[in-house]
Image (cartoon, rainbow, N blue to C red):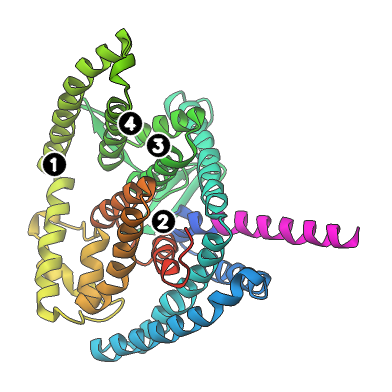
Amino acid sequence: MKLTIKKFNVATLQSLLEYALVVLVILECRSVYSYTVGKNYPFGSLITVILVGLFFLIFSKKEMKKINSKFFIAAILLLLYLLFYAICSGTDTNQIVKLFNRFGFILLLFTYYWAYCIRTETVMRLLKKYVDVMFLLAIISLFMWVSCTLMGLVKPSGNVWISWGETHAIKSYYNIYYETQNALLLGKSIIRNTGIFTEAPMYSLHLIIAFSLEFFLFKRKSKLIVLAITIITTVSTTGIILLVIFIGLKEIIKIFSVNYQKMKVVDLIRIVIIPVAAILMAVTVISLLTAKLGRTSGMTRMDDYTAGFLVWKQHLFVGAGYGDNGRVEQYMGNFRSNNRGFSNSLMIILMEGGICFGLVYLIPIIKCFWTSIKKKKEALFCITILWVFLLVSTLFPHQILMLTFLAFGYAQFITTKL
């Protein structure tokens, strides 16, 4: 009886820690709370504490005995590689501490926990928690966006100052919903649904990841519908483009699953309509991209790649040093005025770390592709493609959300079961 209670308590504690971990990873990645002036919420430190707790919970488990030695060898190799990069790039001492905290500690702890999840076939459990939390945030933001922003039934409770781009004030609704951005839609200015995040693309980042996990792994229609509607209300071009691609992909897959010997009228209609719909979707995506590149935001994105490349080519192998991306401003176009914010992760990584630090990202991505092809994991293949797309289109290079994906790739080097 005592043994049963003990197992129940450990399992419950582990599940609660996983929920807390997921919530903190979401909040750490571009939430308003992370950029509120005068506040310094220790999301990173709390994530570290939870990962250490999970490490000690699973370290002595029999499933990890064969993994432990491989993990410590891999950890030593990664730490030595990071030290080599830090020395060669001339990274500032303070930034070296941040580098090793993120990539030499948090990344390794996440790698170890992912290895445990892969070994025990519980990967889905953690991913499902992420989707469930984002689904709850989507429900709240939709309700607040309709009732507060569109209908004005509830007035703002006050203003909050955030240091995102330029320091500025945003409207707060009891700190569970914020109005941070406007968008021009059909010639009219509307307030975008940004939930608790600093801007629409950052909210869309989380939503599209949750949608893709639900789409490929769990397939719960109610959650897919809510997440899709929420993505549309962000008016984020990247999110909407990916949403259109996902829907098109789903319908195209259905064509290949049709048994032509037992074909029904509905199947015949689908075969005729879907290619036409696919063409229309392609035109829609191209139109959205063209419109985006024609607007100032689109021009800014292209300028980011140009300016980033000009900085990177000065230090192709080791970059300018971890955290050193300030010099890119001198290469930005004059049309940007005071808008000096960056818009993608790829060029930040290459500017700061060149090819040397870029390999820290590239190796786990290649491993995920290799595993997906070798073991015929279609979901892993598609989600990896999505992650690469987000890497080149969204700014979250050193956020812990990014590290979770990298860690999943590295975990596949120390355990072969997947």
- Res 350 → quadrant: bottom left
Q: Which residues are magenta?
A: 1-23
At x 66%, y 55%, the residue is 15
Q: Quadrant of the N terminus?
A: bottom right
Pointer 3 residue: 193
Query: Which amino acid type is marked by label 2?
Result: Arg
Query: Which amino acid type is marked by label 3?
Result: Asn
Q: Answer yes or no: is residue 364 visible.
A: yes
Q: x%, y% of residue 100?
A: 42, 81
Label 4, label 2: how many angstroms apart (C-alpha)?
A: 30 Å
Q: Are marks 1 and 2 in contact (CB under 8 Å)?
A: no
Disc assigned to residue 30: 2
User: Left or right of 366: which side holds 177?
Assistant: right
* Mark toward the start of the polypeptide (3 vs 4): 3
Query: Which amino acid type is marked by label 4?
Result: Lys
Placement of 403 over or under 180, stated as above or below: below
Placement of 243 over or under 61, stated as above or below: above
At x 61%, y 72%, the residue is 55
* Mark toward the start of the polypeptide (3 vs 2): 2
**Dot 2 surroundings within 10 Å: few (below 14), some, or many (20 or more)?**
many
Q: Are marks 4 and 2 in contact (CB under 8 Å)?
A: no
**Nearest the eye: 376 or 293:** 376
At x 85%, y 62%, the residue is 3
* Mark toward the start of the polypeptide (1 vs 2): 2
Of badges 4 and 2, the one in the foreground is 4
Label 4, label 1: how many angstroms apart (C-alpha)?
A: 31 Å
Query: Which amino acid type is marked by label 1?
Result: Arg
Please say whether residue 9 is one of the residues in the magenta stretch: yes
Q: Are marks 3 and 4 in contact (CB under 8 Å)?
A: no
Of badges 3 and 4, the one in the foreground is 4
Pointer 4 residue: 250
Secondary structure under tag 3 reads loop
